[in-house]
């Protein structure tokens, strides 16, 4: 199988290693008798034991869960300066819970947003917020349950990088970026609405 990474509208080799924390037993949550499939916004992703036991290589480009990054931030200053450290956030993690602990978000050349289930639309809001409110200028990558049908809208929300699920065809998925020719509404990728751009 070839690369599953789409970067700036092309299939690209992935230079980054995603660092996964140790698994923890998750409590099954129910609401109105049904299992809740999404974590609640603001809910903690990792416990302290997971944060402390997450290991990663001493060299190379790595993507760390935000809580692991914050735990090791001082020790990683040189690697951050060398653009070797990326951030991994979950859709239920609030950006304002960690943004003040990072001097400059643009010192990170990559932020990955993990969507555990394609139906979790919070990833679109996060993309918009990172680009528009926090002015993140570098690679913004969607990872997890990322499907072809979402790519066009993820791009509109500010994502320029997509790691396609291993059971899907990245060459087919990339076609989703051109499913529509002229979007009507303004968004991150084209802030003026179509009616202001199209000459009559």
Image (cartoon, rainbow, N blue to C red):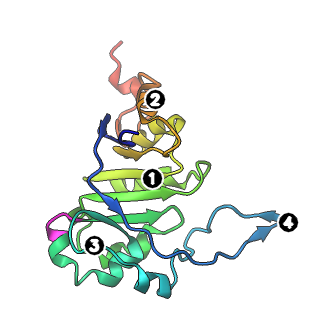
Q: Residue furthest right?
A: 33
Q: Nearer the viewer, mark 1 or mark 2?
A: 2
Classed neighbour count for the residue bearing mark 2: other residues with Cα under 10 Å, few (<14), some (14–19), many (≥20): few
Give how far apart the Cα atoms at labels 3 and 2 are: 33 Å
**Location of mark 2 (residue):** 172
The mark that comes first in sequence, 1 or 3, is 3
- Label disc, if present, on residue 143 of the rendered structure: 1
The disc at residue 33 is: 4
**Mark 1 and mark 3: span between their CA atoms?**
21 Å
**Distance between the alpha carbons at the discs numbered 4 and 3:** 43 Å
Q: Is residue 79 magenta?
A: no
User: Where residue 173 sits: x, y (%)?
Assistant: 46, 33
Magenta residue span: 80-84
The answer to the question of whether label 4 and label 3 lie on touching residues, with beta carbons closer than 8 A, is no
Q: Residues within 10 Å of mark 4 (few under 14, many from 20)?
A: few
Q: Closer to the observer: label 1 or label 3?
A: 3
* Residues at discs 1 and 3 in contact (Cβ within 8 Å): no
Is residue 37 positioned above or below 46 on the image? Answer: above
Mark 1 vs mark 2: which is more N-terminal?
A: 1
């Amino acid at each position: 199988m070839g690369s599953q990474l789409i970067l700036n509208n092309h299939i690209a080799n992935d230079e980054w290693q995603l660092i996964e924390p140790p698994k923890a037993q998750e409590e099954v949550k129910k609401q109105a008798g049904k299992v809740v499939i999404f974590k609640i916004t603001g809910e903690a992703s990792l416990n302290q034991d997971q944060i402390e036991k997450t290991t990663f290589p001493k060299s190379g480009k790595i993507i760390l869960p935000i809580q692991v990054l914050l735990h090791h931030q001082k020790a990683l200053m040189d690697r951050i300066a060398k653009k070797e450290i990326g951030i991994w956030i979950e859709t239920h993690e609030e950006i304002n819970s960690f943004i003040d602990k990072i001097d400059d978000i643009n010192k990170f050349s990559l932020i990955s947003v993990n969507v555990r289930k394609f139906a979790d639309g919070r990833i679109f809001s996060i993309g918009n917020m990172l680009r528009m409110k926090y002015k993140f200028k570098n690679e913004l990558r969607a990872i997890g349950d990322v499907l072809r049908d979402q790519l066009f809208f993820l791009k509109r929300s500010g994502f320029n990088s997509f790691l396609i699920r291993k059971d899907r065809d990245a060459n087919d998925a990339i076609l989703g970026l051109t499913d529509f020719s002229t979007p009507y509404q303004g968004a991150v990728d084209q802030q003026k609405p179509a009616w202001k751009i199209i000459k009559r």
